[in-house]
Image: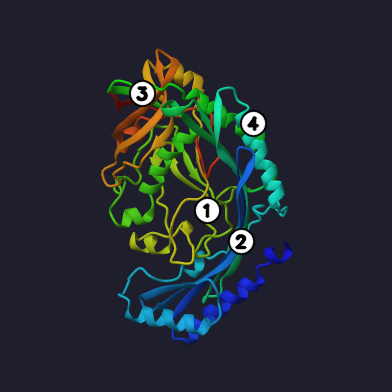
Amino acid sequence: MTDVLDPSALTLAAERLVAAAKRAGADAADAVAIRGMSLSVGVRLGAVEDSERAEGDDFGLRVFVGRRHATVSANALDDPAALAERAVAMARVAPEDPYAGLIDDALLTHTFADLDLVDTSTPNAAELTERALATEAAGLAVAGVTNSGGASASWSLGGMVLVTSRGFSGAWLRSGHSLSMTALAGAGTGMQRDWDASSKLFAADLDDPATIGRRAGERAVARLDPRKVDTGPATILWEPRAATSLIGHLIGAINGTAITRKTSFLRDRMGERIFPAGITIVDDPRVRRGLASRPFDGEGVAGPVLDLIEDGVLKHWLLDGATARELGLVSNGRASRGTGSPSPGSTNVRVSAGTASRADLVASIDHGILVTDMIGSGVNGITGDYSRGASGFLIEKGEITYPVSEITVAGNLKDMFARLIAGDDVEARFSIACPSLMIEGLTVAGR
């Protein structure tokens, strides 16, 4: 494990790539080396179905010749000079990009925060099998569960080295552990399925296998005998794990690439109130043990904590160097990166809690749907028009009644955001931490 955690060999390889690019005629260059290791075990009905292990290093080199640039990648670094020469040759015939270039030196970080991202304990296949079997057994023990869609346990370790021709050199690693189970209830055409999962950086932080399996089983059983509902207006209440999809649409709309391409329905709304007062949405790359935490982004910028939405007002786009230059702004350290060129993305996003419990929100609804699952991706990023399949439970006069399926929820995200009400039940289970979210006056298409 010590050798895996030591980035010196990858750093040296990235340095060789940058040096080779300069010798080949590049005006500037940066190189990334990405390490990935994983082990996963899948079980079904008490037997191992699959076990997979993968590991490898990948390398990417980005070169600039004037305002022209090109990127090449490889999974082995046998000949850095040949790779660099190919990249420079490609850059020389590429079209000019007025916004291309390495990040400004003043934005680079040279101190790296300790975010406690690596669990040094490494499970073997037997340990992962035990976790998966325990998770599945708990799901199958739930009354009404008739079958298993399988359970899985996995471990991963991945990270990045970044070296630039301007003297930046940094590395980070992040571990990951996950458990999941899919349970089936009922039989034949009436069969229903649901799932539950837990993902953390440290194994000790995972939800208990018995809890994950039980939740998966109970969710599947609760979905039995769904009915259709009449088409018409309704209040929609998304439970937290379904509500993350709404925030995901916001994240996509404030991505710098969408703004520069004019493909976002929020492109003209900077500084305006787009959510009700009291709603704050934060993006924080510095959360200790955060699922998307990192000490620097894909260009070497540490990146501050951003209030994307502050008291309902849109305050920031998600920017890397290129999108920031095109918009006349400064990168805020949101460059995501593989072996290719960087592009903007979010890190750990958290929606502020409201004051009402989920039970209070349910009690306030005369006619509506508690949405537990979203289907499809019917969102127009340019107009904000929203139409997505969903399933969940009918709410009548403040009471959850019976499961519903085969419905479509429709509206426009600009109007939906403006009427959003947040519950107090924030769940930090994913990189987007979100409470229940309620919106009145949407259209449900059913029978």
- Kindly report which numbered mark, 4 or 3, lies closer to the viewer in this rendering: 4
Tell me the element at label 4.
Answer: helix
> Pointer 4: residues within 10 angstroms few (<14), some, or many (20+)?
some
Q: How is the protein colored in the picture? A: rainbow
- The kind of residue on which mark 1 rests is Pro
> Which residue is at 41% across, 77% downward?
64
| Circles 3, 2 touching at the beta carbon (< 8 Å) | no
> Pointer 3: residues within 10 angstroms few (<14), some, or many (20+)?
many
Q: Is residue 323 depicted above or below 61 in this figure?
A: above
> Which residue is at 44% across, 35% downward?
243
Tell me the element at label 3.
Answer: strand
- Coordinates of residue 390 in the picture (x, y in percent): 38, 32
Circle nearer the N terminus (3, 2): 2
- Kindly report which numbered mark, 1 or 4, lies closer to the viewer in this rendering: 4
The quarter of the image holding the N terminus is bottom right
- The kind of residue on which mark 4 rests is Ala
- Coordinates of residue 236 in the picture (x, y in percent): 38, 26
Residue 304 disc label: 1
Marks 2 and 4, Cα distance to the nearest angstrom? 36 Å
- The kind of residue on which mark 2 rests is Trp
Residue 138 disc label: 4
Find disc 3 in the rendering and name its residue. Answer: 235
- The kind of residue on which mark 3 rests is Thr
